[in-house]
Amino acid sequence: MKKRVDFIKRYEPSVQAFVEGTFDGDRVLEASSGIDQDLPLAGLLLGVKDIINVDGYRTRCGSELPAQLFEGPQASCVTRLVNAGAVMAGKTVTAEFAVSDPGPTRNPRNLLHTPGGSSSGSAAAVAAGFCDIALGTQTSGSVIRPAGYCGTVGYKPSFGRVALDGVLPFSKSMDHIGLFAKDMSTLAAALPVLVSDWQRVEEGPAVNLSIGVPKGSYLNLARPRLLAQFREKIQVLERLGAGLKPIVLCEDISIHNDNHDLIANAELYRVHEAWFAEFRNVYGPMARAILEFGQSISEQTLARSLKQARGVQLWMQDLMKAQAIDAWVSPVAPDLAPEGLSSTGDFRMNAIWSYTGLPIIAIPTGIDDRNLPYSLQIVGRFGQDEALLKIAQHIFDHIGVSELPLAWNA
């Protein structure tokens, strides 16, 4: 562990994955020295997104608002992982209030590019090798997209399968706790700890998979280089016996993305209403603009949008059953990680899956000549996270990439 701590100390100033002052090498060494090695996550280093409460750490939410506003008991998702032997490494950087004003974190594959957001620090910490697992949150695409941009494994559960207590809300109707993991075996060890009522699935490879390919306005969002790599990878799966089903997911993906945004932003304002009245000018510009939009949405409009969302959620579940789709597969974003730190990236290929509450696992599938990762998101049936893990492991075994170079080794 001493070598690990020294490694973090050496490269963390370049990546800036941790909230300043929250990584303490001596604290990590002390905590790891007494771990029961029979625990399922014994000695794994854990990062926690800084909108999630952890005993002994202040929650700042990437904001200049007073930290005492966000105080509260430790989140049960943290307790589950720590009780299973994970060692807290530090709080990880988040975009302000998990919205869009980015923090200082850089992509450890290419330091000139964003790691994505809003769970930027968690994704970067795992990709850089600082943490084995890290907690994030996703309202639209804030786990799966940074996992893809940073080339690590990412997981978003079915809505409601990981408790959200101890987490500062963005949208009560769209929020999910998510997890980043250094590899598929680590994810497989962590999910039975993290996810409520995890069920064992029978051993053996996934066979006779039916994979939905969401063509039309959804897949048309992707840039040509991503589409080329995506088609190459799914053709490998087809040659191995998977059945590919190209299906028009929807006539206009922007309708669903816009309704998702309306709900999320309206609910965000309702969380921040009192704080926003007092600290409006302390919020970052992107958060302030989104809160002002949320403020403009009436209760009647929000109620209509929530009803529409529920209809789409049920429609998606019925569609997967009717078409006998085991999982959808698509790129995680329209393009690879953007250059610079002013943007956390494009969420338009993520939001539909948060909107419908389906479970997702992201896996890295390659890297370009700038050392930027390619990645796929594998989307399972609602509530069937266990089956999704098995499917994702099978897909990873054939088209996934286990190790990607870091910026300082590329």
Image (spheres, rainbow, N blue to C red):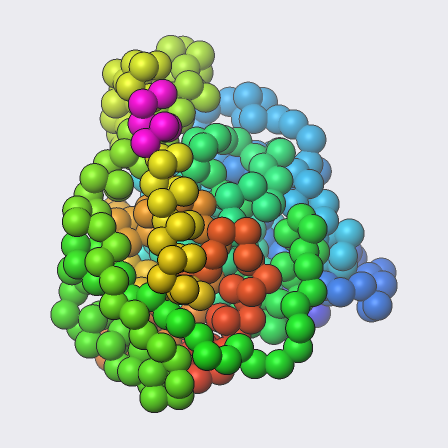
Locate the C terminus by quadrant: bottom left
Q: Position of residue 60 (x, y in %)?
A: 52, 33
Of residues 239 and 175, the one nearer the viewer is: 239
Residue ID at (17%, 59%): 216
The residue at the point 43 percent across, 37 percent down is: 174
**Quadrant hosting residue 218:** bottom left
Q: Main secondary structure of the magenta part?
A: helix
Q: Is residue 310 positioned above or below 193 on the image? A: above
Q: Is residue 379 left or right of residue 332?
A: right
Please give the count of numbered marks on the rendered protein.
0
User: Camera-side residue: 16 or 308?
Assistant: 308
Residue shown at the point (39%, 80%) measured from the top left: 242
Position in image of residue 191 (x %, y %): 63, 59
Q: Is residue 310 visible?
A: yes
Q: For the N terminus, which image quadrant?
A: bottom right
Q: Is residue 279 visible?
A: no
Residue lying farthest front?
Answer: 322
Tell me if 245 is positioned left or right of 225 in this view. Answer: right
Residue drawn at x 69%, y 31% as measured from the top left: 73
User: Nearest the camera: 151 or 307?
Assistant: 307
Where on the picture, by quarter, is residue 222?
Answer: bottom left
The residue range painted magenta reads 303-308
| Front in this rendered view, residue 149 or 236 | 236
